[in-house]
Image: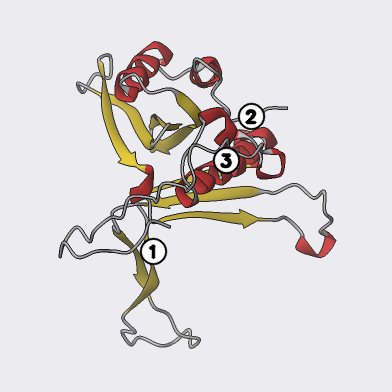
Amino acid sequence: MAPMTYSGERGQRLVEDINKAGFYPQLVIDVVQDSLDGRSPVSHLVQLETHIDRTEVHRHITVLVLAEDVLHVTHVDDEEFDESGRDVVARVSTETVGISQIRSVTLSYSYYQPANYRPDSPISEVTLAIAWTGTLHVDLAPALCDDPQCQADHGYTGTAAREDIVLRISAEADGPAAVEGAREFARTLRRANLSPLTDGAQIAQPAHGRVPAPRRGPTATPRTRFTDRFTGRDGGPAR
């Protein structure tokens, strides 16, 4: 059985998932197809999020598509164009990243009631973080101490992580299938990033079910090396 993020030979599943999200589907489909620029989609992840800001409701959609040797990132959100709220404008951004440029694919898990964990226990949520430029995301908050009467300034504390895009998928909000789909997409992206690309459908298959790639010559072609974008020095072989 094909994994749920496999886009299909002509991207039919990708189109179905965008339509299912229901956020300006034809606009999103056209933007994604334009960004693919003729490449065949292999695996994808569609994430629709809703945020409530006082009396306003904002939605935005992110579409990740692994297509041959690149990762396409499409983001579309809408906002009120005037104060009356009757006119709306859609903001679109797209980015294309070479698979060899991806530095890390991080997948964080959350399990509810871990004391009761079993091999078939469902995952409560996952957070997928992908980094390719080395952008440092810093999340700070005022540092506190144990003394509730303390008035001293303890500075700030927080976390720092290198990430270019982060998606949170919750079983409660998005459904268990969406969580499993995010896990499968992360596995597919990791396989594409860590090994030479061959046939798209083959990459999209689970690792334990993959058929070895046919030999194209006596030795495999090495992955392209990439350089540090600031110094121009060799950053080593692609991971």
Q: In the image, what residue occupies the spot 64% across and 29% down?
A: 4
State the quadrant of the C terminus. bottom left
Q: CA distance from mark 1 to mark 3?
A: 20 Å
Q: Nearer the viewer, mark 2 or mark 1?
A: 2
Mark 3 Cα within 10 Å, few/some/many (few <14, many 20+)?
Answer: many
Q: Nearer the viewer, residue 27 or 236?
A: 236
Q: Secondary structure at mark 1?
A: strand
Q: Position of residue 19 (x, y in %)?
A: 50, 15
Q: Position of residue 126 (x, y in %)?
A: 58, 49
Q: CA distance from mark 2 to mark 1?
A: 29 Å
Q: Position of residue 64 (x, y in %)?
A: 43, 34
Q: In the image, what residue occupies the spot 33% across and 50% down?
A: 224
Label total for image? 3
Q: Earlier in the sequence, mark 1 or mark 3?
A: 1
Residue 237 sits in quarter? bottom left
Q: Nearer the viewer, residue 114 or 153?
A: 114
Mark 2 Cα within 10 Å, few/some/many (few <14, many 20+)?
Answer: some
Q: Residue 4 shows which numbered tag? A: 2
Give the amino acid type for the residue marked by disc 3 in the picture. Ala
Residue 86 sits in quarter? top left
Q: Secondary structure at mark 2?
A: loop
Q: CA distance from mark 3 to mark 2?
A: 9 Å
Q: Which residue is mark 1?
A: 161
Q: Earlier in the sequence, mark 2 or mark 1?
A: 2
Where 158 sits versus 226, above or below? Answer: below
Q: In this image, 51 relative to 112: left or right?
A: left
Q: Which residue is mark 3?
A: 182
Labels 1 & 3 near each other (Cβ < 8 A): no
